[in-house]
Amino acid sequence: MRKAVLVTGASSGVGLALCKRLLEEDHELHLCLACRNRSKAEAVRAALLASRPLAEVSIVQVDVSDLQSVFRASRELKQRFQRLDYVYLNAGIMPNPQLNIKALFSGLFSS
């Protein structure tokens, strides 16, 4: 069974560099790009597959600054994957006084 790896902020910068490196190190993993912009993520996915055609790369659209988007993405990931072997939380967010961190973590890690 392939290892499943989720990378947030995977469409540019450090996240994209990490995705490239992960595929160089282990071409048999299932890499899931967690990105805000779907079209940008599709372009990155195509580029990654062009250099590693045997890789398995999927996309989940998520805006980490939007709690509802995070919950929707977590439900989608639970349906898609039996487990995530590695999660790289690379995406950055600006401080939001309306964000309830306790509720966020409770929702993400509850079964």
Image (spheres, rainbow, N blue to C red):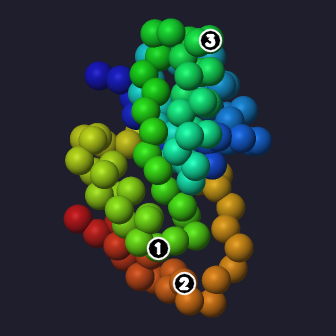
Left/right placement of residue 41 relative to residue 12 reads left
| Image quarter of residue 82 | top left
Vertically, is 42 above or below 104? Answer: above
Residue carrying label 3: 51
Element at label 2: loop
Identified at 61% across, 39% down, the residue is 40
Q: Which part of the image, by quadrant, shows the C terminus?
A: bottom left
Say if mark 1 contacts mark 2, CB within 8 Å: yes
Left/right placement of residue 27 relative to residue 2 reads right
Element at label 3: helix
Looking at this view, is 45 or 22 the one in front?
45
The mark found on residue 67 in the picture is 1
Q: Position of residue 15 (x, y in %)?
A: 67, 41
- For marks 3 and 1, give the CA distance: 34 Å
- For marks 2 and 3, give the CA distance: 39 Å
- For marks 1 and 2, give the CA distance: 7 Å
Left/right placement of residue 54 relative to residue 71 reads right
Looking at this view, is 12 or 78 the one in front?
12
Nearest to N terminus: mark 2 or mark 3: 3
Identified at 54% across, 17% down, the residue is 49
The amino acid type found where label 1 is placed reads Leu
Say if mark 2 contacts mark 3, CB within 8 Å: no
Say if mark 3 contacts mark 1, CB within 8 Å: no
The amino acid type found where label 2 is placed reads Leu
Q: Position of residue 63 (x, y in %)?
A: 54, 61
How many neighbours does mark 3 have within 10 angstroms: few (below 14), some (14-19), or many (20 or more)? few
Identified at 68% across, 35% down, the residue is 16
Residue carrying label 2: 99
Q: Residue at the far front: name it.
A: 39
Vertically, is 107 above or below 18? Answer: below
